[in-house]
Image: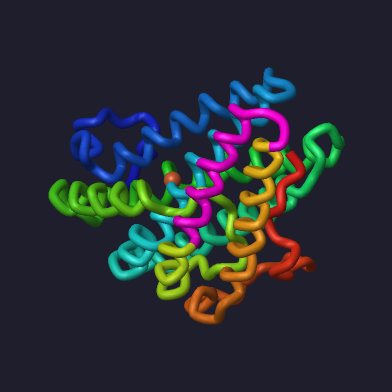
Amino acid sequence: MTHTIATQSTAELGGRASVLVRQKRDHVELDRLLHAIDGATGARRQDLLNEVARLVFPHAFAEESVLWPVIRRTLPDGEAVTLRIEQEHQQINELWTELEKTDPDDTRHRDLWRRIETLLREDVRDEEDVLLPKLQAALDRNRLTALGVAWEAVRRIAPTRPHPVVARRPPGNVAAAAPLTVLDRGRDRLDRWSRHTGGAKSQGLRAVSTGLARLAGAIEHIPPLTRGEHPSTATTRSEADPRDDGVPKS
Ligand SMILES: [Fe+2]
Ligand SMILES: [Fe+2]
């Protein structure tokens, strides 16, 4: 018998370093940001959307590269439960890539965001109510801690943007980690600088960021980075074209 981790205490989940506690902490922060976005407009809303991206993409990348492989090896139904979540992650990556290319003032931007928000909430429920309780039942406290440390280490250095073309599984996503992390985090820095400067300098920084987005889009298509993908999570984007990737409109 397994119970949702949502209502369990830190001690019940294996202590502060447990992967279950670390997961729940991010999910709670995500819930806070989603509520904040509901009432936000303009630049404030865009800042909050960026915060969600910086939270959820490294979180999910580390799940896919560190946690789900362990779950597939440990649980009899690990393949089915992780595949469902990989499919949710894939849809979020695809929709967010569309969101970045859509004018924030367009009604389509709000529609895309509603779909992403729904998927994010479903993903949290599937993890907290189904997958993580099964992991809790299968692993002792020491293994939950070891997994928490490994997941956190990858989460801190993982890509921070959507990458719908790279594999949702090793070895492709592991091969993608280093180049995409450098490009994504470089873009995060450039975008921050551009918001704090003005005029031609800001435009120049944004142009460099756009160039890095195109480079990341091209790198995503290199065959080792798509290796290991389950067919059901291969990108369905009609525009799976390296020249048309991740160039934001906001
Ligand atoms: Fe999660
Ligand atoms: Fe997730």
Q: Quadrant of residue 226?
A: bottom right
Q: Residue at x 65, y 22 (%)?
A: 44
Please name the predominant secondary structure of the magenta segment in the image.
Answer: helix
Eyeballing the image, is 187 above or below 50?
Answer: below
Between 92 and 101, the one lying in front of the other is 101
* Residue 215 position within the rendered picture, expressed as x and y whole percent measured from the top left: 61, 64
Region rendered in magenta = 180-200
Total number of numbered labels?
A: 0
For residue 136: magenta?
no
Apparent side of residue 69 relative to residue 109 in the rendered image (left or right): left
The foreground one among 74 and 40 is 40
Q: Please, is residue 81 above or below residue 203 in the view?
A: below
The C terminus, quarter of image = top right
**Where is 109 relative to 81, above or below?**
above
Taking the spot 29% from the left edge, 50% from the top edge, the residue there is 153
Foreground of the two, 47 or 96: 47
